[in-house]
Amino acid sequence: MAILLSELYGKQIISNAGKKIGYVEDIVLNFENGAVSSLLITKMDDLMRSTNTAKLLANNSVLYERVKSVSETIIVGSDSVKK
């Protein structure tokens, strides 16, 4: 199933346990394999202003491989949030 990246922006991310995680603010792409790598719950611009970008990126992202369902919301496995 193909999804346009623009359809992911602004969607609410919820764990499969029902915990509200946040909203998709930005997306990290892996250009080597042509796939989405992570969904960010903070804008990338905000992360780049920090001196500890790598840690903030890890703490404010959801690995796309953990996404279970995309519809009106994005459902992810409980262990997928690094926040």
Image (tube, rainbow, N blue to C red):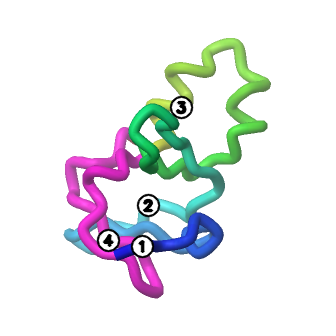
Whole-number angstrom distance, CA of label 1 to CA of label 3: 26 Å
- Given the image, on which type of amino acid does mark 3 rest? Leu
Q: Nearer the viewer, residue 46 or 6?
A: 6
The location of residue 62, given as percent across then percent down, is 40, 48
Circle 2 residue: 21
Whole-number angstrom distance, CA of label 3 to CA of label 2: 15 Å
Which residue is painted at 61% across and 15% down in the image? 52
Whole-number angstrom distance, CA of label 4 to CA of label 1: 17 Å
Task: Check if mark 3's residue and mark 4's residue have beta carbons within 8 Å.
Answer: no
Whole-number angstrom distance, CA of label 4 to CA of label 2: 10 Å
- Given the image, on which type of amino acid does mark 2 rest? Ile
The location of residue 43, given as percent across then percent down, is 70, 46
Which residue is painted at 37% across and 69% down in the image? 14
Q: Nearer the N terminus, badge 3 or badge 4?
A: 3
Which residue is painted at 72% across and 21% down in the image? 50
**In which quadrant of the rendered view does residue 16 lie?**
bottom left
Q: Which residues are magenta?
A: 62-82
Single out the mark in the foreground, 4 or 1: 1
Whole-number angstrom distance, CA of label 1 to CA of label 2: 24 Å
Question: Residue 75, labelled with which disc?
Answer: 4
Circle 3 residue: 57
Task: Check if mark 1's residue and mark 2's residue have beta carbons within 8 Å.
Answer: no
Circle 1 residue: 2
Q: Nearer the viewer, residue 53 or 35?
A: 35
Q: Nearer the N terminus, badge 3 or badge 2?
A: 2
Density class for disc 3 (Cα within 10 Å; few <14, some 14-19, many ≥20) is many
Single out the mark in the foreground, 1 or 2: 1
